[in-house]
Amino acid sequence: MASQVKAREGRSAWTLVPRLRPTAAWALAPAAAVLFAFWLLPLAHLIVLGGQSREGSDSGYWQVLSSAQYLGSLAQTCMLALVVTLAALLVGGVSGVFLSRQRFFGRSALVALLTFPLAFPGVVVGFLVILLAGRQGLFASLGLELAGERWIFAYSLTGLFVGYLYFSIPRVILTVMAACESLDRSLEEAAHSLGAGHWRVVCDVIVPGLAPALVSCGAICFATSMGAFGTAFTLGTRLNVTPVAIYNVFTNYANFALAAALSVVLGGLTWLVLLLARTLVKPSRTVL
């Protein structure tokens, strides 16, 4: 009797698992073929290539793990991406909440202006940073007038930080504005009615409500800053960030194994951050 009950429970549990219909399988076939041909196969080849070694040298992975230069490049890239992410979340989060809650003349034009950098590729962003803080930029002219010396920071990590922040803030603004639309304003009113001040409501109601969106958007900003190449390449190939190091190893030294190993390690670190963000942002479950 017990075995029959367990069998029925097993069948009922199996019926709850959604089955893939033949039509849906045929619909997914093109996407699966593209994924396999243009993503899985090249990725597998890249992983295998990173384990190979040139004549008289170690494998690409060992060269990365045993080199202070490449480890320092990875650490510097991660730190830069982290600082850019935190700054973008702070600036874009405050701006997104304000633009979502306030209605004023020219609001749509301001939102369009703040999100316009998303239309620029990385090369254009790097060129804009050079126009701002390059040798002939606005800060150089201003420093020459005020202090008698040119203020130049476009070709350093500071310039790269400005460039990455330039195209990270619009992503946060759009995400936060969309998330604010789903916040329950009655919770804020209830907190105010119980005597909570403005900052208490922000810390206890608004920030927790926006936390999933902020974590998800922060992970995207981090991943984008980790792999951005156009801006770094425009500002100078001497910057010690991993995308530029991959380019130099690949083009100047033709060390394909080392370039593949650096790519795999960089992608693995970025994937771990995305996986961590996905585990932190748990989807809400509706009880039927």
Image: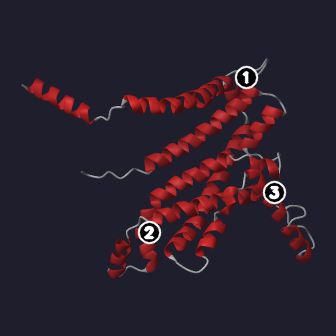
Q: Say which quarter of the image contains residue 183.
A: bottom left
Across and down, in percent, residue 276 comes to 49, 46
Query: Separation of disc 2 and disc 1 at Cα?
Result: 52 Å
Q: Which residue is mark 3?
A: 127
Which residue type does callout 3 highlight? Phe
Q: Is residue 274 above or below residue 22?
A: below
Which quadrant holds the N terminus?
top left
Q: Which residue is mark 2?
A: 206
- Residue, x 36% and y 77% (percent of image)? 189
Q: Report the front residue among 270 and 60.
A: 270
Q: Is 95 left, or right, of 1 in this rendering?
A: right
Tag 1 or tag 2, which sits nearer the N-term?
A: 1
Tag 1 or tag 3, which sits nearer the N-term?
A: 1
Q: Nearer the viewer, mark 3 or mark 1?
A: 3
Q: Is 187 left, or right, of 246 in this rendering?
A: left
Which residue type does callout 2 highlight? Ile
Across and down, in percent, residue 187 comes to 35, 72
Q: Residues within 10 Å of mark 2 (few under 14, many from 20)?
A: some
Q: Residues within 10 Å of mark 1 (few under 14, many from 20)?
A: some
Q: Say which quarter of the image contains residue 47.
A: top right
Q: Residue furthest front?
A: 23
Q: Which residue is mark 1?
A: 58
Which residue type does callout 1 highlight? Asp
Tag 2 or tag 3, which sits nearer the N-term?
A: 3
Marker disc for residue 31: none
Label 3 with label 2: CB-CB less than 8 Å: no
Across and down, in percent, residue 190 comes to 33, 76
